[in-house]
Amino acid sequence: MLRTIFSQSSRVITQSAFTGARALSASAVSRDKVLMVLYEAGEAAKEQRLLGCKENALGLRGWLESQGHTVVATSDKEGPNSEFEKHIEDAHVVITTPFHPGYVTADRIAKAKNLKLCITAGVGSDHVDLDAANTKNIGVYEVTGSNVTSVAEHVVMAILCLVRNFVPAHEMIKKGEWKVADVAKASFDVEGKVIGTVGCGRIGYRVLQRLQPFEPKELLYSDYQPISKELEDAVGVRHVSLEELVAKCDIITINAPLTPETRGLFNKELLAKCKKGVYIVNTARGAIVDTQALVDAVESGHVAGYAGDVWFPQPASRYHPWRIMPRHAMTPHVSGTTLDAQTRYANGVKDILTRYYAKEPQQPQNIICEGGAILSRAYSKTGKIETKVSDSGA
Ligand code: NAI
């Protein structure tokens, strides 16, 4: 039996009969310790809509404290003496964002004696060791769909920046120069190119929707959860193997989660199979691309340009080689944290917490792990909760 669920961002997910969406038993209804690991904003925190920072604590501090919970919000997350390391020992709930992720490793889970819930304020829960969380029946949830449009817009922007050779042109202007030929010698149109997405879930599909009006030669995707023929036809995309995709594409956008299968997927061998002169945009996760193999491929010219906003680990070291490799259009991890997205993921975190403390089932599309198993099919080919994206969600 299939049923249709309208997600927060109006996307439609078709789900197999799902029996696992039971309420978690909240061991302590009050007086939980809620640990938030969020980026520090400093002066920028005066912008009240910047909810995803340590200072503004997702706008949830007063609400949680009024229910008797203790809230610890910190950006100090690295090393044995960090606030994160100290507080995870007795925290009941950990909330973090992929932008400044508190890495919930197996070691940290082992010493977290009260931990019941890990919530991602945003999308992407690879910062949690899912297998370790499952051994202790820790629920892992994210605010599915909360920032997918934000990321899709960034992907299109990044593709244009690379293909049109925008970054050197802009830098030249700031330096007082005017060398049209230096920019034009490596500037192309998106029109007429073959473009492919690795992963065609909520973001991948929205990228295709936004690229279709550019009149590419062909749109391709690879994914072990193929979308329906109706959705394929709506954007004019064709399902192919990863090998065919990399061999044919002039532009590749990566939109799959970081899993054991995708970690290091774009290694030396796969990059070598890509078409010479390919542009690659990765807003999924930095660890999907092998750091040095990419640098080598860009330096040799095999990859014409690379862009995105994701690095590993984060924050990226100031000496990370992607900062200084040629022909890149990298930013810090910002694509999914527009102020519009922050409102959506802060509301989504509140919804997850409300359901948890009321012992109500979570919205299925937000469940990554529950009851000791990975339920999201995006994270496991055997997951029960399928991802299907409709036209109407954009
Ligand atoms: P989604 O769950 O809707 O779609 C992911 C798709 O990837 C699914 O269709 C899944 O089957 C597919 N997939 C999984 N493994 C694959 C593989 N080995 N090869 C091909 N396809 C595979 O997720 P959504 O919302 O589209 O997000 C995708 C990823 O983007 C997130 O997991 C996260 O890592 C990243 N992200 C980045 C953000 C940013 O600010 N840069 C913000 C939001 C998400």
Image (cartoon, grey):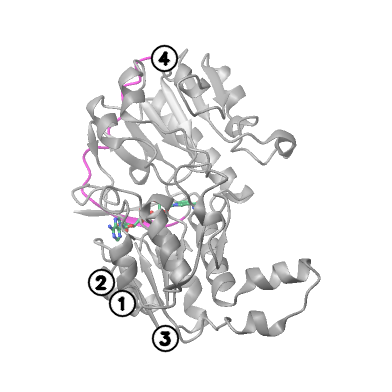
Mark 2 Cα-neighbour bin, 10 Å: few <14, some 14–19, many ≥20: few
User: Which secondary structure, mark 2?
Assistant: helix
- Which residues, given as a range, are shown in magenta? 10-28
Q: Using the image, tell me which numbered label, if any, was put on residue 273.
A: none
Residue 133, horizontal then vertical, whole percent? 29, 30
C-alpha span from label 4 to label 3: 55 Å
Dot 4 amino acid type: Asp
The residue at the point 78 percent across, 74 percent down is 177
For label 1, the residue is 247
User: Which secondary structure, mark 1?
Assistant: helix
Q: In this picture, is 278 found above or below 113? A: below
Dot 1 amino acid type: Ala
C-alpha span from label 4 to label 1: 50 Å
* Front residue of 166 and 365: 166
Mark 4 Cα-neighbour bin, 10 Å: few <14, some 14–19, many ≥20: some
Membership of 142 in magenta stretch: no
**Apparent side of residue 195 relative to residue 210 in the rendered image (left or right):** left
**Pointer 1 or 3: first along the chain:** 3
Residue 149 in view here: yes
